[in-house]
Image: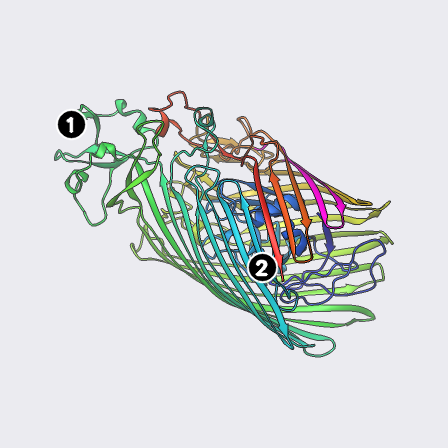
Amino acid sequence: MKKRYLLTCIGIAFNASAVQTSADIDGIENIVITGANPLSQLSQTQSIIGQTQTLSRTELHDTPTRSLAEILRNQLVSVNINDVQNNPFQPDVQYRGFTASPLLGLPQGLSIYLNGTRVNEPFGDTVNWDLLPLEALDNVVLFSTSNPIFGQNTLGGALALNTKNGFNYTDTQINASLGQYGREEWSIQTGNQSGNWGWYGLLNQYQEEGWRDYSPSEVLQLFSTLSYHTTTTQVDLSWLHADNELLGNGAIPEDLPAFESRASVYTHPDKTNNELDFVSVNINSELNDSLSIIVNAFYRDNTTSSINGDDSDFGACELDNGFITLCEMDDDDDDDLADINMNDADDDDAQIADADDFEVVEFVGYEDLAFSQISNIDPSDVDRTYNPGQADNQSFGFTTQFTQRHRLGAKPATTIIGFGAINGDIHYAADTTFGILDNDSALSSRTVTPISGIMDAEAMVRLDVDTRATFAYISNITQLSLATNINIAARYNRDHILMNDHLADGEGSLDGDHRFTSFNPAIGLSYQVDADTLFNISLAQATRVPSPAELSCADENDPCRLPNGFVADPPLDKVVTRTLEVSATGKFSMTNYNATVFYSQSIDDIIFQQAGTTSSRGYFINIDKTQRLGAELSAQRQYDNVLVSGSYNYLDATFESSFTSFSPMNPLGPDRQVNPGDSIPGQPKHQVKLRAEYSVSTNWLLGAQYIYASKQYYRGDEANENKPITGYGLINLYSNYEYSNALSFSMRIDNALDHDYDTFGTYGEADEVLEDIYPQIDSPYFIGVGHPRMLSVNAQYTF
């Protein structure tokens, strides 16, 4: 891998940009960030707010990696993955302790952009990695620090994805990949230009059976760009369509693999369907020799449908009239029925709870009727829930930016002024259908089958949300001397979230009118120490407002089930993060290096508190203070036909204020006291990434990579009182062979030594499902198992 650390001013919220100053520093590579709308040539003498890592087209597509998230983890410093769902397109991607994930329930601290458009979903600020067309990417840029110019959610950094067009890609290529566990992928892409016109198109199809049981996935992506470029103006109109079905069946009890395998599942299905249409236009025009304008406008329509077979807190109970129905029990009431008033209610002497002791379920369409009056199924057999949900996310917006190159006194300077607006229209619907688990023996599938038409009225959600965001920003870069540049920037955000509950009014409804404003400044200074060394320091502030999903699920007295149940809640505060970053980039004895230290402090950070037997039941709260303190060191050197590179990062992600973690499934019991200095779960303190590449000949490359991540705490162990998840080390091997200018082959072996490892942990109640099959399994520890050895091969034909 060629890690490229760039010192750059970020000029706009939606486009990676830079301002050209003086000549390149000897020994440091001059790099251009390309994409739909680059502002200008980038050189290493820029003043900076943070730094960047880039991946070129070659680095993105050299080997048949399954997903963009895996490429980021493998090749970029401080990037980690938690395989919560065990689906290559549904990982939690972490950078410096901040997360971008497709799952509700995680604090989203990274902003993601595709061709200048923010693609965090309006409902939960989540990121659907399956909707990003990997094969169409020309380059990827990861920006560090809390740079306010990138807008909301840029607490830890921002990821900018730039695609190909008919002016930077003028080939036609057919690509085919095969791999273990039923993996098949093929794509065709073509690009060309004629005069001022250019066009690019991609069709990509991916499918796999999945290495976990019952986990097939299909991904279909179509992407196209029509371009019109002159010497002063570039216009790019892009369209992306995706239609994907993903199954990822989540964590399993840590003892289950000993009885079955690491591929086994606890319960299923857990399915997500994403269907996207996304249109954007980018216009970049030089108005005169010193003034330019960029306009970005987009319309995005994404429908996410989910089905989740889950544990249940419902049980059979008897009404005063003798009918048997369902009641909502406390978390452990199904284990302690002997302690409550019992009645023998059927011929099998099954114990049925007295409904007077619990909340009786009201069924949709069957008000005031008991379960036994509307179904022939024995209520005692109803042991699970089947939770369908759908979020229709529509968003549209624009950004306009002016860049003026001028002099500030006698000093060369560039001033950037931008403004814009983004509107979101969300329709969310969710139901809880009662179901039965296929769990008669060890050979059973543990599938949750819904009982058609029998739904919990209280759990039904019909919610409309309108989001309105307006913003303005300014950035000035001034060259103080040949060696020194300063960048001062600021952004003003105004957010309005209007929520309309279609099922309830007044007290208890989800209606809400939430308004947030913020002003976030930043300053960066770069200094050329000598011909080979560049020093940088920056201080920046960014914010994120609570998402509609978080605002609908923040009451500890009435926890919700994600992504289904939402309740009327107290308000949450916005999150404010300030980051101080110091770095040095340079060359020493033919070795390129980068060293960085950073400190991020978040005020009113939002976390999810687990409040039930499943990890999806809980509520969001503000934590007064959290911090991420870290250091990064990376180096790269070429020895004739051998390239070696390596990186190490240290991350101390901690809570810095006291609070009580509810965590009812914690092995030590609920209500654990969290103290300042306790580590945030799911974050390894140490990561090491080593790589060696050997060029056997001009057309044959062999490569090996080692990835190490240290131990981390289970989610739900915010107090750090229990055993952690063991650290792991993986070896990946790969090879590329160019048979001719037109035909090339590659292969990759991930986890070549077939090492058993875990990337995630949480707590649950294993005996709820397994006590009759495997009574020995009663541990509350659940693990997100890492994938086994995986072999994949690829062929590319270009003409």
Q: Residue at x 74, y 72 (%)?
A: 405
Q: Which residue is mark 1?
A: 346
Amino acid on which the number 1 mark rests in the picture? Asp
Quarter residue 150 falls in: bottom right
Q: CA distance from mark 1 to mark 2?
A: 62 Å
Any part of residue 231 in sight:
yes
The residue positioned farthest toward the bottom in the image shown? 288
Q: Residues within 10 Å of mark 2 (few under 14, many from 20)?
A: many
- Looking at the image, residue 183 lies above or below residue 724: below
Quarter residue 481 falls in: bottom right
Q: Residue at x 40, y 50 (%)?
A: 552
Q: Which mark is residue 157?
A: none
Q: Is residue 359 left or right of residue 444?
A: left
- Looking at the image, residue 739 lies above or below residue 634: below
- Looking at the image, residue 227 lies above or below residue 202: below
Instruction: Look at the image and say whether residue 327 sits in the magenta stretch.
Output: no
* Residue nearest the observer in this picture, 391 or 195: 195
Q: Is residue 212 left or right of residue 74?
A: left
Q: Which residue is mark 2?
A: 136
Q: Residue at x 81, y 71 (%)?
A: 409
In the rendering, at what x and y percent does residue 595 appear? 76, 44
Q: Which residues lie in the magenta part?
A: 685-712
Amino acid on which the number 2 mark rests in the picture? Ala
Colour mode of the rendering: rainbow
